Amino acid sequence: MKVLRASDYKRMPWKNGGGETAEIAVFPHGAAFSEFGWRISMATVAVDGPFSAFPGVDRTLTILSGTGMELAIDGRAPTTLDPQSVPLAFPADVATSARLTGGIVVDLNVMTRRDAFTHHVERLALPHIGRRNEATEFLFCSAGTIMLETEAGRFELQAFDCAAIPSESTVLSVSGHGAALMIEIHPADRAS
């Protein structure tokens, strides 16, 4: 079990240069935008504009704070997201642009290269009774303080901290006064 603290995340410019992202985890470790198999990051969006394109990549976006944004994804009707919305999955290689609905937004992005990995992001209702972990999993604290209990012990996560849960571990429970997202990453040859 490894707890990734928000204060330690690597910060870097967006691929299109329009803002900054905080990289939470990437595989392989240290991989560049063109090389990652999967990537989890947070972005602060302060202005309307286009998303960076990532050929061959699938993305899920979740609003963490702020009023929200309207996404225009090529081939779909516009979608409005806010901090209560279900995480939105869409291809990262189609034209996508965002319009803020009321000021700066912080969002969580999970991306997987579709020929190698798939992923799923879910908002957890707390308290949450866990299960055996058969994927690469991350528990992300999206607000407040949460407690993660595994067979390895109890771990406290503050807002924007993330726990990397080893495969074959058992999540016993997630509780606390906060909000949490579970991120699962599977090899592409396994159904999620």
Image (cartoon, grey):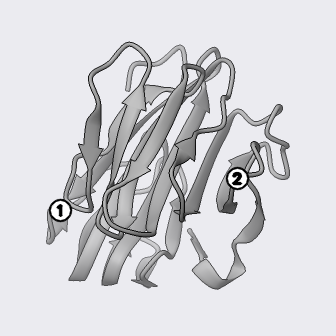
- Residue 132: percent from left, percent from top: 33, 49
In the figure, residue 61 lies in which quadrant?
top left
Which is more N-terminal, label 1 or label 2?
Answer: 2
Residue 127 visible in this rendered orientation of the protein: yes
Q: Which amino acid does label 2 sit on?
A: Gly
- Residue 111: percent from left, percent from top: 57, 38
Q: Callout 1: few (<14), some (14-19), or many (20+) C-alpha neighbours within 10 Å?
A: few
Q: Is residue 149 left or right of residue 134?
A: left
* Residue at image coords 34%, 59%: 181
Local secondary structure at mark 1: strand
Local secondary structure at mark 2: loop
Which mark, residue 167?
none
Q: Which residue, given by chain and number where applicable, does mark 1 sit on?
A: 129
- Residue 108: percent from left, percent from top: 47, 56
Residue 110's place in the image compared with 171, above or below, is above
Q: Which of 139 and 94 is in front in this view?
A: 94
Q: Which residue, given by chain and number where applicable, does mark 2 sit on?
A: 18
All told, the count of numbered labels is 2
> In which quadrant is the N terminus drawn?
bottom right
Q: In this view, does 44 lie to the left or right of 175?
A: right
* Residue at image coords 84%, 44%: 31
Residue 183 visible in this rendered orientation of the protein: no
* Residue at image coords 26%, 72%: 179
Q: Is residue 81 left or right of residue 188?
A: left
Residue 24's place in the image compared with 191, above or below, is below
* Residue at image coords 48%, 75%: 160
